[in-house]
Every structure is written in structure tokens, then in C-alpha cells.
Amino acid sequence: MTTLEIKNLNKFFGHKQALYDVSFDMQPGTILGLIGPNGAGKSTIMKSIVGLTNYNSGSITIDGKPLSKNHRKGLQNVGSMIESPAPYPNLTGRQNLKLFNDGSTTNEEMQQIMEETQIIDFADRKAKKYSLGMKQRLGVAIALLNHPKLLILDEPMNGLDPQSTHDLRELLVNLSKRGISILISSHLLDELARIADYYVVINHGKVIKKADSQSFLSEGPKTVRFETDDLDKAYDALVTAGFEVTKNDKNVEIADTNESMNAALAALSNAGLEILNVSRNQVDLEESLLNLLTDDNQKEAK
Ligand SMILES: Nc1ncnc2c1ncn2[C@@H]1O[C@H](COP(=O)(O)OP(=O)(O)OP(=O)(O)O)[C@@H](O)[C@H]1O
């Protein structure tokens, strides 16, 4: 059964429309990256799902159950950490978890959550003494209480050091393997690219792209880079052979097409150059996103 289905969601703040007919869905056990620039509407979508804000029209269905527009937070089946996590500062991590437990999480499960999110070592310290990274981890632990089928995490990697980011990534992948769907927004696109199965791109409150991670990245331009013993000469040789060339500190780069590799290699070796390395490159998530946003903003400006 579809875990989350959002259809034609519209949201106004006063006269200002923040979401325009946003629609997408999530299947069980998938990680969906919600991406877009600041102010695009990502948090508003997440808040609408958990009832932190109401919406004007459209529908949200979780695990087959439609939500009303003014539903309260504390939804069954949904765990969330939206904007900064807000544990009670004068309670310890463990006490916070107990407080957010609706009674369905056993002590053993609570222990497992504390271990998985690695808050166990500071679980008996007051939350006000936590660093940002520790608070983030406690936020994820709270989201994991009560057996969620859907986890909604807004910028969960903020403030985490590289080891903690790595650990959180592993945890999220393991949770998705257990069938939990994870909706995650992050500006740390390299991190997101390592775990997301699908992306939904938001710009100015509209969905401008939905794609699985493979096709999202493979649609972008590909290039081939050559390292040689003389980059200036390599640049000239490729330009003379009719290529559009970019010269970097370490290599020269051309568009990767079916014919370009052989023709470029021939041009470089005819110029007497020693080819030290050849690499094919696909655009990364950040580049794909920037290309998409540039196209969309140009369309809007017309
Ligand atoms: N409480 C509010 N009152 C009025 N406008 C709001 C409110 N919350 C958000 N907005 C507006 O709605 C739009 C979407 O904001 P939102 O916070 O959802 O963006 P975002 O994609 O999450 O951005 P960021 O990446 O900066 O978190 C923005 O134009 C924002 O100014």
C-alpha cells in the first residue's frame, strides 16, 4: 500500500501562495529526497503532513487513511523531526523519549532506539546540555518512537560531524530496508545522494521534477576528462579538432558523446601528447539541481 499520497496540495499564507498543486507519493521502504532552494516550500509540505500547519486544498493520505485539513499533530504511523528538534531542555534524553512514547514502545525497543541513534552514552544527561548534533540524534530517536511507517526528517544532518552523518545515513538505510518510508529534506546534497531512491524537486512552491535517483542523475550532461603531460597543448589540439573544451587545473574536459572519446583520443595522440588518465563523469546531484532550477527560473521569467 502507498505509504504517503499527496494530491494537489495548495497552501496560502495570507494572500501569498506557498504551495501550488503539489502532488507526489511514496511507496513503503523508500527514501525520498525533497530538494529545492530556501523558501521553496519543503518545510511547508512537511508541516502540512504532520499537522503543524493546515492547508487550503488538496489531500494527504497516509497508509490508505485520508487526513483532514486541520488534523492535529501526533499522527499514528508518522514520526517526524521538522525544523530544529525541540526536546524538553530540563529533561534527560531518556526522560524525553519516555514522554513522547505513546505507550506502544516497549523498554527494549526504547533501548534499541537509543543504541541505533547513538544517544545511549548521554541518555541520562539533561537535553539542555546537548550539542546541536546530540539534539539532532535525540530528535531522530523521538521520531522513531511508536513504530512509524513514515519518517519525516527536515535537515536531519545539520550540525552532525562526519562520523555521526555516516552513522545516521546507515541508520536511515537500515530503517528503509525494514519497510519504513523516509521523507527527508537536506541541503547537504552529497549526503542525500548517497541514500535517496527518489527525488522531488520544489521551486517557488511547485513540483518541478519527480524522478528516481538513477534517471535524475543520468539525464544531466556527461563529460569526459583527459589528463595529459601538457594541458595547454591538449586544449589547443582538441579545439583544433572542433571540440568545445574546458581547461581545469588538472585536465581538459569535453562533452561525452558516442563519438567524442575516440576522436579526442586521436587528436591528443596525433599532437604527440602523453595521455595520463581518462575519466568519464556524470553530473552530481547539486549540478543537476542547479541546472533544473536555472531552466525553471528562466521559464518563469518569460
Ligand atoms: N509562517 C509563515 N508565515 C508566512 N509565510 C511563511 C510562513 N512559513 C513559510 N512561509 C513562506 O512560505 C514559503 C515556503 O517556505 P518554507 O519554509 O516551506 O521553505 P523551505 O523550502 O522549507 O525553505 P528552507 O530550505 O529555507 O527551509 C516561503 O516564501 C516562506 O517565506
Image (cartoon, helix red, strand yellow):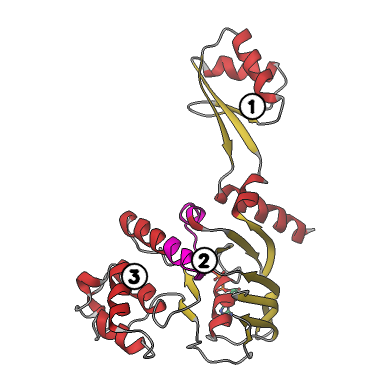
Q: Is residue 291 above or below residue 70?
A: above
| For marks 3 and 2 on the same chain, the one whose residue lies earlier in the sequence | 3
- Point out the tag, 1 or 3, that comes first from the N-terminus: 3
Q: Is mark 2 within 8 Å of ligand 1?
A: yes
Mark 2: amino acid: Ser
Secondary structure at badge 3 equals helix
Secondary structure category for the residue under label 1: loop
> How far across and how far down the image is residue 295, in percent?
71, 53
Answer few, some or many: residues within 10 Å of disc 1's Cα (few below 14, many 20 plus, some between 14 and 19).
Answer: some
Distance (Cα) linking label 2 and label 1? 35 Å
Instruction: Report the residue marked by disc 1.
Output: 245
Between label 1 and label 3, give the one nearer the viewer.
Answer: 3
Label 3 beta carbon within 8 A of ligand 1: no
Determine which quarter of the picture holds residue 240.
top right
Q: Left or right of 101: which side holds 262?
A: right
Q: Quadrant of ligand 1?
A: bottom right
Q: Which residue is mark 2?
A: 185
Position above or below: 73 against 210: below
Give the magenta-colored segment's residue range.
172-194
Secondary structure type for disc 2? strand
